[in-house]
Amino acid sequence: MWQTFGRGWQARVDGVRASGQQLATGASASAAPVPVAADPSLMPSVDYEIVRRGSRGIWVEKLQEALGITVDGIFGPETEAALKAYQQDAGLTDGGVAGRKTYQALGLIA
């Protein structure tokens, strides 16, 4: 497991530790070098929901808005067709399921 995920998790732990030390000591970001992983703008977002036909909610609304279609928060046939077309045009797997890679391509997450 460490060979696959270890470096990423260690970078995350180092970033959280550096942020915690800055908060605890009141040190400014310029007082000590901060690992890249501690900079929230460089961290990939993990706050998203995988949506597919039948899904409802805020992530469906975000997807619909990004695709430029009617926003109703219900992942129906129109959303699925628009998503598949977008995925195909973007060179993504066009399975009609919106997950991390689709959201990244649409600029919804980092």
Image: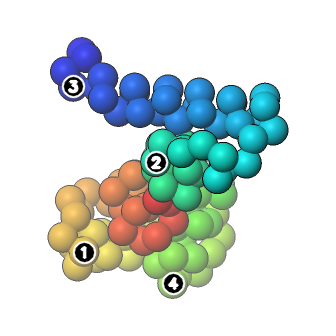
Q: Residue at x 25, y 17 (%)?
A: 2
Q: Nearer the viewer, residue 109 or 85?
A: 109
How far separated are the C-alphas under marks 3 and 2?
A: 20 Å
Front: mark 1 or 4:
1
Kind of residue at disc 2? Val
Residue located beneath label 4 in the image: 68
Q: Is residue 59 left or right of residue 99?
A: right
How far separated are the C-alphas under marks 3 and 4?
A: 37 Å
Kind of residue at disc 4? Gly
How far separated are the C-alphas under marks 1 and 2?
A: 28 Å
Q: Which callout, 1 or 2, points at the residue further toward the start of the chain?
A: 2
Up-down: is 74 above or below 35?
Answer: below
Residue located beneath label 1 in the image: 90
Specify the quadrant of the image occupied by residue 57: bottom right
Q: Nearer the viewer, residue 89 or 31?
A: 31
SS of the residue under disc 4: loop
Residue located beneath label 2 in the image: 36
Kind of residue at disc 3? Thr
Residue located beneath label 3 in the image: 4
Badge 2: residue crowd in 10 Å (few <14, some 14–19, many ≥20): some
Q: Which callout, 3 or 2, points at the residue further toward the start of the chain?
A: 3
Up-down: is 11 above or below 49?
Answer: above
- In contact (CB < 8 Å): disc 1 and disc 2: no
Front: mark 2 or 4:
2
